[in-house]
Image: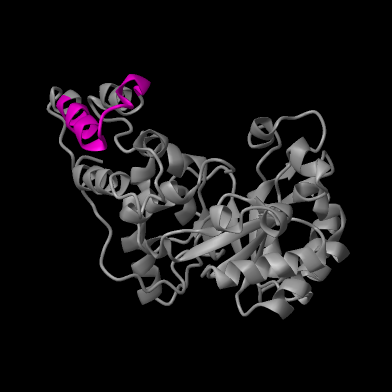
């Protein structure tokens, strides 16, 4: 989700769900250690509970990056061992690290020793076309022994050659059973399922045996699916079925369950230079375009918010134009 789940996106999603964990886009250790740290790590406390996802392979660098994440107020550090892009491979991190479990374990231990935050690892179930699980079991075993207790598992292999990142999310077959077996093999670890999950119903199918689900692009393109998550998470907590997404969350207040109210809150955010870090409303608005996914008038509403010819206007004026386009269709804001 690089270049997608920035701070503006996360603020928007937090309006709709208060209990689900949010994850940052991946930030490399090099960017944190040699770049503008504040630009990468600044965020609004409203985004909590929030995990910082980092990419890297050198244990010392990972430890320093984790320390920065703790200093900036993040509540979990997540190491990406699942991204298959060639750019990431050239940096010797991402999915290719699954072939180096000892190095990953050393990195996890270095982070565990340097911060008080939980360390999680996001990874695939294998590499290329090899559908055996010996490498996966060895990887999880070494990393778990090093101190990782939470594994976020994309239930596909990563094909490091011949497929684009998009194809790597679609072509390698989903094998959910492999993740379920990991939970049986490592009952003291927590496993969150990723890959192919489109909505709450998909998560529920695995909820009895696993510890949670991670939804990426589906939640981005149709964010209103998040509006049902808080009630579900509360129900799981009340029945003693701890959910990774809800665990540790003590957000004050409740999510906004009215699309018009969410849109208005985002307009207020866009016009608050302190909270929006001075970003222009147009660069923020791209994240809300799925708010009215599948509803009458949504296309015209999106056209208003994405019209570059309106960039000179104030966000409040654009909001008025978008509402006018929407309500010409008599669109009820509360529809699902």
Position of 101 relative to 315 (above/below): below
Query: How many marks on residues?
Result: 0
Query: Which residue does the image show at 65% across and 50% down from the upper left?
Result: 154
Q: What type of secondary structure mainly makes up the magenta span?
A: helix
Q: Quadrant of residue 85?
A: top right
Residue 206 visible in the current orientation: no
Q: Position of residue 37 (x, y in %)?
A: 61, 58
Query: Which residue does the image show at 59% across and 43% down from the upper left?
Result: 2
Please indicate whether residue 290 sits to the left or right of residue 25 in the image. left
Query: Which residue does the image show at 28% across and 24% down from the upper left?
Result: 304
| Of the pair 32 and 200, the residue shown nearer to us | 32
Position of 265 relative to 70 (above/below): above
Query: Which residue does the image show at 50% across and 40% down from the upper left?
Result: 217
Specify whether residue 72 is painted magenta. Answer: no
Please indicate whether residue 120 sits to the left or right of residue 23 in the image. right
* Image quadrant occupied by the C terminus: top left
Q: Quadrant of residue 152?
A: bottom right
Position of 328 relative to 156 (above/below): above
Q: Position of residue 305 (x, y in %)?
A: 31, 29
Q: Position of residue 55 (x, y in %)?
A: 71, 54
| Of the pair 34 and 46, the residue shown nearer to us | 34
Q: Position of residue 18 (x, y in %)?
A: 35, 62
Way the structure is coloured = one colour
Specify whether residue 311 is painted magenta. Answer: yes
Residue 9 visible in the current orientation: yes
Magenta region: 307-324
| Of the pair 47 and 235, the residue shown nearer to us | 47
* Image quadrant occupied by the N terminus: top right
Position of 247 relative to 54 (above/below): below
């Amino acid at each position: 989700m690089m270049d997608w789940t920035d701070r503006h996106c996360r603020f928007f999603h937090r309006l709709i769900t208060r209990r689900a964990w949010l994850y940052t886009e991946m930030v490399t250790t090099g960017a944190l250690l040699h770049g503008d740290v504040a630009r990468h790590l600044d965020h609004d406390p409203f985004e909590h509970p929030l995990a910082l996802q980092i990419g890297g392979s050198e244990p010392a660098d990972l430890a320093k990056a984790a320390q920065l994440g703790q200093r900036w107020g993040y509540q979990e550090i997540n190491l990406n061992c699942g991204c298959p892009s060639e750019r990431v491979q050239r940096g010797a991190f991402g999915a290719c690290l699954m072939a180096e479990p000892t190095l990953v374990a050393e990195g996890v231990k270095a982070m565990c020793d340097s911060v008080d935050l939980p360390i999680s690892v996001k990874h695939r179930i294998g590499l290329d076309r090899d559908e055996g699980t010996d490498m996966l079991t060895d990887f999880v075993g070494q990393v778990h022994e090093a101190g990782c207790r939470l594994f976020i598992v994309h239930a596909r292999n990563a094909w490091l050659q011949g497929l684009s990142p998009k194809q790597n999310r679609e072509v390698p077959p989903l094998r959910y059973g492999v993740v379920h077996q990991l939970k049986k093999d490592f009952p003291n670890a927590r496993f969150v399922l990723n890959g192919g999950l489109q909505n709450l119903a998909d998560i529920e199918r695995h909820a009895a045996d696993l510890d949670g689900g991670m939804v990426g692009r589906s939640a981005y393109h149709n964010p209103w699916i998040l509006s049902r998550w808080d009630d579900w998470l509360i129900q799981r907590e009340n029945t003693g079925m701890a959910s990774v997404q809800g665990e540790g969350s003590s957000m004050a207040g409740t999510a906004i369950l009215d699309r018009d109210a969410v849109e208005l809150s985002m307009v207020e955010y866009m016009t608050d230079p302190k909270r929006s870090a001075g970003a222009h409303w147009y660069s923020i608005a791209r994240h809300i375009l799925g708010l009215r996914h599948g509803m009458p008038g949504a296309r015209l509403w999106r056209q208003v918010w994405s019209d570059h010819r309106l960039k000179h206007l104030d966000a409040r004026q654009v909001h008025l134009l978008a509402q006018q386009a929407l309500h010409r269709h008599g669109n009820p804001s509360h529809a699902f």
